[in-house]
Image: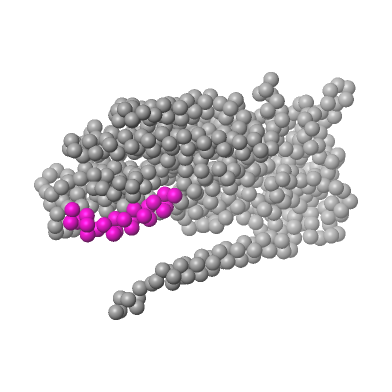
Amino acid sequence: MKKKSQALSRRDFFHKLGVQVASAGAGVLLAQTAQEAGAAGAVKKYAMVIDTNRCTGCQGCTIACKSENNVPDGFFRSWVKVGMKGTYPDVSTHFLPRLCNNCEDAPCLNLCPTGATYRTYEDGVVHVNRDVCVGCRICVVACPYGARFPNPITKTADKCDFCYHRITKGLQPACVDACTGRARIFGDLNDPESEVSRYMQNHSTQRLRADLDTRPKVHYVYADENLMGPDYHRLLGRSRS
Amino acid sequence: MNETSQYIFWVSHDVALGYLIAWYLWLISLAEGTHIVAHMSWLYYRTEDYRPLEKVGSFQPFIILALVPLFLVADLGHPERFYTMFYHWHWTSPVAYGVYVITLCMITYAMHAFYLFRPELMHLAGQPGALQFIYRLLTFGKKEKGSIAEIRRRQESRERFWAGASLFFSFLGLIYLGILLSSFKGRVMWHSSVMVFIFFAFGACSGSAFLILLTHLKNSLVHTGSKALTEQRRYLTEFGILLKYSVVGQAAVFFIYFVLLQYTGIGGRLASHVFFSGPRAFQFWTFQVVIGLALPFALMLYRKMRGNVLVSCIAAIATLIGTLFGCVNIFIGGQMLPMTHFNWETLSPEPVRMTFGIALMIIMFVVFLATYKILPYENIES
């Protein structure tokens, strides 16, 4: 008799299971919504606009970044991709300064197994916590922009964080300070009076790999389409010949 | 569109995750596939004669899963922080779930194998012999009354519980491998809905092949009664059919995968080009298609060939080679597609890591052989 009262009928079992699954699902949904709301409601939204028409390809930003952040030889947090187009005498040179996009929906952050990659919600910058990073390099593979690298000195992932140690003291990132043509404009997009906001209002901008919906926070003005992504046409064409 | 005639300066990124992780994925799919094939077949046969094969299908995957984390640890920048993944958990990352799934797989395989071996271990612990202390240790010094058949009957519900749990985690493990790769949305070769099915196909092929190979190996090393041997060979002949259809299934999944890639824009076409005539073409056509698919299919086509020990072992080895290269081709090939420039990314040679990986696989194999001599794989009727 006692045994019978403790037994769970199939209907009860599925009912309880359903309730538990539904609660777990709702919990996950709430956590996700809270995270997205946190990202959207950040006090500041640091971003960069790069006017490629102003870039002279001097690589001053590359050098400034390397020396400011002690970037090891052979690796780059910021660099300028340079390409030439056309045939002589109609030749044009194009520059595309590159750095971490500090995406709003960063694949590297989502795939980091330990949470070593994190976003500061007060300004939206994506960081790497070197004390927690295990050096699995998943984020390096996950980044669609090739902006990350495994640092051979720290043995952890490394990337541009808009020179966080500088911007939190009211300074500009090293690459912005070093840019001779003032091609790089950095600031808070949530502040309508900031230079970066005003520049974005007055220019049409492009973002890298917009198809992936990662919402990069580095915007380009007059960037050459050919330089903006990987050249798959060239790879396919090359092998055909 | 394609007007750029010359690139002056760009940055290459190289293949970040190399052979150790590719082998890690393959070994996990192999271990889980072996367990699924062994246990699903038990559900079909449900006879005592089948137990030795189920033991192989439970304990050998456990050995693989117990040693396979070393591949991951050796590949980390900070191996000493490996356990950070367990307590510094990040809920959006598939790997964060994976470390638990693989650990639970390993635990459930160990428990299932324990209950499979327990009746024979109980019996042997009471017998005189050189290895008696090991048997006593493995049964925690406990004694149970009755014959082996009675012990089996008494523990049947526990045995089946752990079998069911291990089967559940095996499926979860294969799903994890597929989801892990498909979650890289910037990697066009991996970001595919077929990736889970590819790992299921790898699991089915390598699992049935591994079971055939290891059981034949067991029978050649351990004395098996003629009746039991005949029965086990009959099962293995039928596993040959399973292997044949798994190979067909793998071919079908890859066909669908390539068709889908054709409709995924130029990135998808380039991804399939990596296999057909790109940097992984030789490995794809030679090892994956000819050795891994065509050869085992041809060898397992007729019953007479499936019944031949040598032929079925060759087919099993060929299938294992095929799935290994399949895993490597997808994993390394997926990283060879450039993210920012116009050349294939290259994989820097990793002689130390590769030597470590090969040495670890040899150790696994030696452990397999050692357990054949120590543990009672064959049924003992007291």
- For the question of whether residue B137 can be seen, the reply is no
Q: Residue furthest top?
A: A241
Q: Quadrant of the N terminus of chain B?
A: top right
Report the number of discs. Answer: 0
Instruction: Determine whether B121 is above or below A73 in the image.
Output: below
* Residue B377 place in picture, x, y as percent: 23, 43
The residue at the point 49 percent across, 48 percent down is B175
Asked whether A85 falls inside the magenta stretch, the response is no
Drawn side of residue B53 relative to residue B98, left or right: left
The residue at the point 69 percent across, 46 percent down is A212
* Residue A6 place in picture, x, y as percent: 35, 76
> What range of the chain is rendered magenta?
B149-171
Drawn side of residue B196 relative to residue A88, left or right: left
For residue B33, what is the image quadrant?
A: top left
The residue at the point 83 percent across, 55 percent down is A197
For this rendering, which residue is in front, B350 or B195? Answer: B195
Instruction: Determine whether B172 is above or below B189 in the image.
Output: below
Q: Residue furthest bottom?
A: A1
For residue B235, what is the image quadrant?
A: top left
Asked whether B160 falls inside the magenta stretch, the response is yes
* Residue B283 place in picture, x, y as percent: 51, 27
For this rendering, which residue is in front, A162 or A85? Answer: A85
- Check the image and tell me how it is coloured: one colour
* Residue A182 place in picture, x, y as percent: 84, 44
- For the question of whether residue A10 can be seen, the reply is yes
For this rendering, which residue is in front, A93 or B47? Answer: B47
* Main secondary structure type of the part rendered in magenta: helix
The residue at the point 36 percent across, 47 percent down is B40
